[in-house]
Image: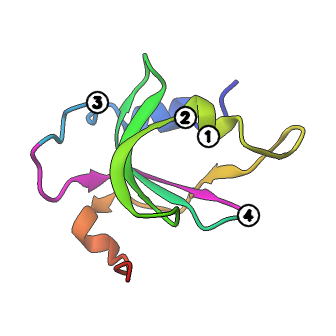
Amino acid sequence: MSHLATPEFKKLFENYPFYSQEGNKDPVVVVKLFDTYGSATWYLTEYSEVENNAFGYVTGLSHDEWGYVSLTELESIMLAPQVPRIERDMYFESVKFSELKLKKAC
């Protein structure tokens, strides 16, 4: 069973399938995922259950960018057997992207 794409996760994206926010200059960020032992954070705006992929904004890697991410791949990143490294921020509430107040990269 998926620890990221849970039934609750999928329900949050019912109104945000792929391309539902295309062209929106200030999309709604539905879910936040983060690397528990790193600096990467994913702010997801759309999700495809069929592909188990999401679209959103990632920070904390070599450069910040909008793009697609495979939840299957994120779920495969483990600290140890059966200990996932990528987790969902259960306290995150949906906001417009502009409200995140992300720090600009230098």
Distance between mark 4 and mark 1 Cα atoms:
13 Å
Q: Earlier in the sequence, mark 4 or mark 2?
A: 4
* Disc 2 secondary structure class: helix
**Residue 23 found in image quarter:** top left
The magenta segment is 23-37
Query: What residue does disc 2 label?
Result: 71
* Disc 3 secondary structure class: loop
On the question of residue 5 being in view, the answer is no
Query: What residue does disc 4 label?
Result: 37
Q: Is residue 43 left or right of residue 62?
A: left
Q: Mark 2 touching mark 3, by CB under 8 A?
A: no
Query: What residue does disc 3 label?
Result: 17
Q: Amino acid at mark 1?
A: Leu
Q: Mark 3 touching mark 1, by CB under 8 A?
A: no
Q: Mark 2 touching mark 1, by CB under 8 A?
A: yes
Query: What residue does disc 1 label?
Result: 74
Distance between mark 3 and mark 1 Cα atoms:
19 Å
Report the mark closest to the observer, 3 or 4.
4
Q: Amino acid at mark 2?
A: Leu
